[in-house]
């Protein structure tokens, strides 16, 4: 992401797993991994993260990438989240919730595609 920032400019924000309440769910060696990297400039907006799966999930073609959906509107984010998720058939579902970098949620859809949702933090 720092390379992309050098190439494209913009503001880069990086949040490691160890900076989040989720850190207790993962072994300490994973705490330095990036849970969210976000690069935003006038021309581009890119988000990314490191591989976070538990040891029971092996990295294979199809589970190492995701589609990020971002919105400044919590209502729009919630509507898209609810329409795209695959009902009860999703063991990796994380409903929309507050994180240090804003609202976050994720799931794998019925086709095995990971969707990650990110929005602005709710107002206090």
Image (cartoon, rainbow, N blue to C red):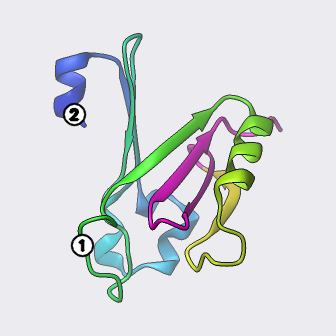
In this picture, residue 96 sits left or right of residue 5: right
* Front label number (1 vs 2): 1
Reply yes or no: does residue 14 show up in magenta.
no
In this picture, residue 52 sits left or right of residue 77: left
List x then y, in percent, for residue 60: 24, 72
Q: Which span of residues is magenta-colored?
A: 100-124
Q: Mark 1 points at which residue?
A: 60
Residue nearer the viewer, 92 or 36: 92
Which quadrant of the view contains residue 122? Answer: top right
The residue located at (61%, 70%) in the rendering is: 93
The residue located at (31%, 61%) in the rendering is: 33
List x then y, in percent, for residue 61: 24, 66
Q: Residue 2 carries which label?
A: 2
- Residue count near mark 1 (Cα–Cα under 10 Å), binned few <14, some 14–19, many ≥20: few
The residue located at (71%, 77%) in the rendering is: 88
Q: What element carries label 2?
A: helix
List x then y, in percent, for residue 102: 62, 43
Residue nearer the viewer, 47 or 34: 47
Q: What element carries label 1?
A: loop
Q: Which residue lies furthest to the bottom in this view?
A: 56
The residue located at (38%, 81%) in the rendering is: 54
List x then y, in percent, for residue 99: 62, 52
- Measured Cα–Cα span from mark 1 to mark 2: 25 Å
Q: Mark 1 or mark 2: which comes first in sequence? A: 2
Q: Residue 75 carries which label?
A: none
Q: Which residue lies furthest to the front in this view?
A: 111
Reply yes or no: does residue 117 show up in magenta.
yes
Q: Using the image, determine if residue 56 lies above or below residue 124.
A: below
- Residue count near mark 2 (Cα–Cα under 10 Å), binned few <14, some 14–19, many ≥20: some
Quarter the N terminus occupies: top left
Quarter the C terminus occupies: top right
- Asked if disc 1 and disc 2 are in contact, CB closer than 8 Å, the reply is no
């Amino acid at each position: 992401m720092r390379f992309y920032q050098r190439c494209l400019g913009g503001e880069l924000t990086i949040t490691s797993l160890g900076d989040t309440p989720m850190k207790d769910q993962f072994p300490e060696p994973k705490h330095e991994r990036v849970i969210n990297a976000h690069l935003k400039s006038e021309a581009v907006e890119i988000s990314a993260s490191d591989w976070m799966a538990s040891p029971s999930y092996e990295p294979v073609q199809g589970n190492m990438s995701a589609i990020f959906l971002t919105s400044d509107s919590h209502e729009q984010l919630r509507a898209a989240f609810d329409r795209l998720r695959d009902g009860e058939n999703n063991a990796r579902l994380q409903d929309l919730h507050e994180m240090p970098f804003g609202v976050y949620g994720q799931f794998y859809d019925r086709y095995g595609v990971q969707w990650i949702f990110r929005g602005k933090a709710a107002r206090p």
